[in-house]
Image (cartoon, rainbow, N blue to C red):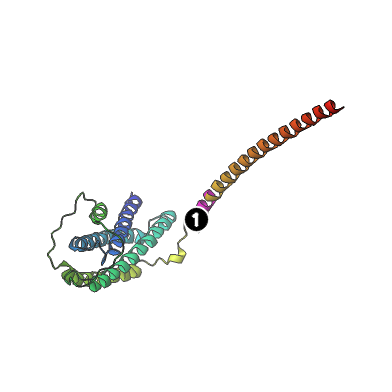
Amino acid sequence: MVKEECKALLDALSKVTACYRHMVLTIGGTSDSQNLREELKKTRQKAQELAVANRNKLTAVLKDKTVSKEDKTEFERLWVIFSTCMEILEIDMKRALELGQEFPLNVPKKHLIQTGMSGGTSGVAARAMSVQNMKYEAEHNIDVVDLKDLENEINQVGEMMYEMEMKVNVPQWTVEAKQDPGAELKSTISLGASSIGMISVEENKSFCDISKVLAGIIFSAVLIIAIVLAVCVVKLS
């Protein structure tokens, strides 16, 4: 039961973190707006809430001496995935801070990045937040106020990651993967090779069919010519 709860929390964190990265890439672009900045704020706060829940669950389980060796191995694997999500979140928060400082909304003369992307991001944010519609309640100077909050939250995430390493020491190189390195890539290659093989077989079949038709035509032509020559010889004689 605890394992399923940890997996569900980790899955939610992964989705919200991926959503946050997607929206960070639109800062300074043609989709940038006050609503985007508010979506970014709500999404990263949701990610931090899920991060705290994940940390508390996994820390308690990994410190429990009664957990079986098999279960502990699985929880250590989840811990490594969780740590990776936190590293990605911290990187994207720092990127959001840099882009937000470079492209403030309250400076209209500042040229935005022409990324070629257009449209809103509210749908993506709403799915990550598990709500049907996003509610916007921020003030007009959200980009200025939020950047200060973002700096503090980046420091909090950094401190949280440091405390995680102190409380639970799970080196990433000690955790074994469930499948061989490059297993997904190999399966993709094998599928591609099989499809290529099928195409080559079909091409060979079609080539053989064409060869048979040509051979039949040539044989018929030779037979007709032989008959004509035979008739001519009989008449001449």
The mark total stands at 1
Magenta stretch: residue 166 in it?
no
**Residue 118, percent from left and from top:** 27, 58
Closer to us: 198 or 203 = 203
Residue 126 vertical position relative to residue 30 in the rendered view, above or below = above
Closer to us: 70 or 218 = 218
Determine whether, in the image, residue 111 is placed left or right of residue 73.
left
Element class at badge 1: helix
In the image, what residue occupies the spot 34% across and 70% down? Answer: 166
Residue 27 vertical position relative to residue 71 in the rendered view, above or below = below
Q: Is residue 214 visible?
A: yes
- Give the quarter of the image for residue 165: bottom left
Q: Main secondary structure of the magenta part?
A: helix
Residue topped by disc 1: 185
Q: Is residue 179 visible?
A: no
Closer to us: 186 or 222 = 222
Q: Residue pushed farthest front? A: 236
Magenta stretch: residue 188 in it?
yes
**Residue 73, percent from left and from top:** 43, 57
**Residue 8, percent from left and from top:** 32, 52
**Residue 179, percent from left and from top:** 49, 55
Closer to us: 21 or 198 = 198
In the image, what residue occupies the spot 25% across and 71% down? Answer: 97
- Give the quarter of the image for residue 88: bottom left
- Which residues are drawn in magenta? 186-191
What amino acid is labelled 1 in the image? Leu
Residue 109 vertical position relative to residue 121 in the rendered view, above or below = below
Determine whether, in the image, residue 219 is placed left or right of residue 27.
right
